[in-house]
Amino acid sequence: MGKTNGLSQTAANRGRKINTRWRDHFLEALAESSNVTKSAEAAGIPKGKAYRTRINEPEFARRWMDALYEGYEHLEMEVLRRLRAGDFQTENGDKYDFGAVVRLLTMHRENAARAQAAKRNISATEIRSSIDRKVEEIRLRVMREAKEYTNNGD
């Protein structure tokens, strides 16, 4: 089997085939994970290519923001689901790290605010305030649930 840039011919062909739709694969994964590295891997591209494309293609940049906002909403809903259900453990039995999730939500609130503001045609400041209220509610709820969890001896 021949080599192309250090890849077997099969790998090179597979890469070309994936890359014809890599943007869609990348954005779908980004909406699920909010993780650029994992999304690039899912799309079969180096993450630098995704960043360069975002800089050079305004439509891709817009879709990227939409995907991040969707991912932000998924994460927010997952936290609320876990709190409501009393689901404090990961699939492998580790304690779910609510603190890290709240930090992540806080860290990405600006991007989420901009994406939502663009969609709803209202100011990013209004959206940021709304997000801040939601994150604070989640943080307080996590603290309450953690206290109850600890007091119950689980």
Image: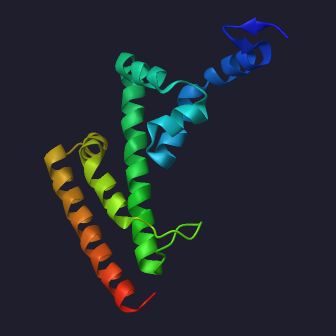
Taking 64 as reference, is 150 above or below it? Answer: below
Q: Please report the residue visible at 58 percent of the width from the left and 66 percent of the height from the top.
A: 91
Residue beneath the point at 73% across and 21% down: 14
Q: Is any atom of residue 27 visible in this view?
A: no
Direction bottom: furthest residue: 152
Relative to 88, residue 56 above or below: above
Q: Is residue 107 above or below residue 63?
A: below
Residue lying at 43% horizontally and 49% vertically, measured from the top left: 71
Query: Percent from the top left, x then y, of residue 50?
Result: 46, 25
How many numbered circles does the render carry? 0
**Where residue 105 sits in the image (x, y, percent)?**
31, 54
Say left or right for 24 vs 125.
Answer: right
Q: How is the structure coloured here?
A: rainbow
Instruction: Classify the position of the N terminus by image quarter.
Output: top right
- Residue 148 visible? The answer is yes
Image quadrant in which you'd find residue 45? top right
Residue 3 placement (x, y as % from top left) = 76, 8
Of 113 and 99, which appears nearest the observer? 99
Residue reaching furthest right? 1
What residue is rendered at 78% in x and 12% in y? 9
Taking depth in this image into account, of 44 and 1 the one nearest to the observer is 1
Residue 133 lies in quadrant: bottom left
